[in-house]
Amino acid sequence: MADQTLAARPEPSPGARLAWGLLSTLLLAALISITNRSWIFGLAGVVGVFVHEYGHVLAINALGCGPGRITIVPFMGGAATPRIPPSSEFRGVLIALAGPTFGLLAMIPFFFAYAYTYDRAWLGGAFFIALINLVNLAPAPPLDGSKAFGPALAAIHPWLERGALVLLGGAAVLWAISTHNFLFGALLAVGVLGALKRGALRPYARKLNAPEWLGSVALYAAALILCALAFYLALDGRLAFAFAPLASLFGR
């Protein structure tokens, strides 16, 4: 999910953060495992979320908005939170796109496991990770696409962004409900309605200039193509056998 700015509040102790993080991670893994009837999917979900959010954190820290922090939200996913809000919409775009692109790296160990065991459940785990990152590029709050592509739409006209929120956000909610992902659908619905009620979606960030607008559109398109390609390769399965020589070193 997209980054969120940390509000001023008392800091919990390191022990409390660790305990809550472990509990949240176990709850998320259990939900995914039960929903998909496979512990491998639960593992893929947790690994995929952590690598995805760590991509956000790397961008947050590199752009001077850190230190970033990863929070696992039980039954929902994760969030990367910067200490300082991005100073421009373009920096927000870079932070938003870092998650889905970096998150694809989490597919590698699952491709390797499939090449080693020939168990298609591992390929399903890679597919699930690709799906997480691809869905996150939908331009509907609180997903990454809303901050990655929303500013480019708003630069043309603010109502174009809001129209996209209604159409694509509504379509994403209907998809989530049709696939029985009711919690995810509720999260999207709340995010879209909350964004529509706010007067300005990014009130404190410097708006995109012309070169940044072109860069934002190009980077969003590239991330979308990359995630769609990873999604296809996970469905196809042949890429996994590129790891066969490495798997042979471990006895396969």
Image: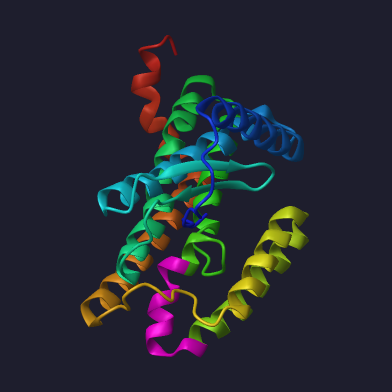
Q: Residue at x 55, y 80 (%)?
A: 164
The picture quadrant where one finds residue 214 is: bottom left
Look at the image and name its color scheme: rainbow
Q: Residue at x 47, y 87 (%)?
A: 158
Is 3 in front, or is 41? Answer: 3
- 7 in relation to 158, above or below: above
Q: Which residues are magenta?
A: 147-159
The picture quadrant where one finds residue 179 is: bottom right
- 216 in relation to 11, above or below: below
Q: Residue at x 30, y 47 (%)?
A: 61
> Principal SS element in the magenta part?
helix
- Which quarter shows the C terminus? top left
Q: Is residue 196 left or right of residue 250?
A: right
Query: How many dots with numbers?
Result: 0
Q: Is residue 212 left or right of residue 40?
A: left
Q: Position of residue 122 (x, y in %)?
A: 56, 30
Q: Position of residue 249 (x, y in %)?
A: 35, 12
- 25 in relation to 98, above or below: above
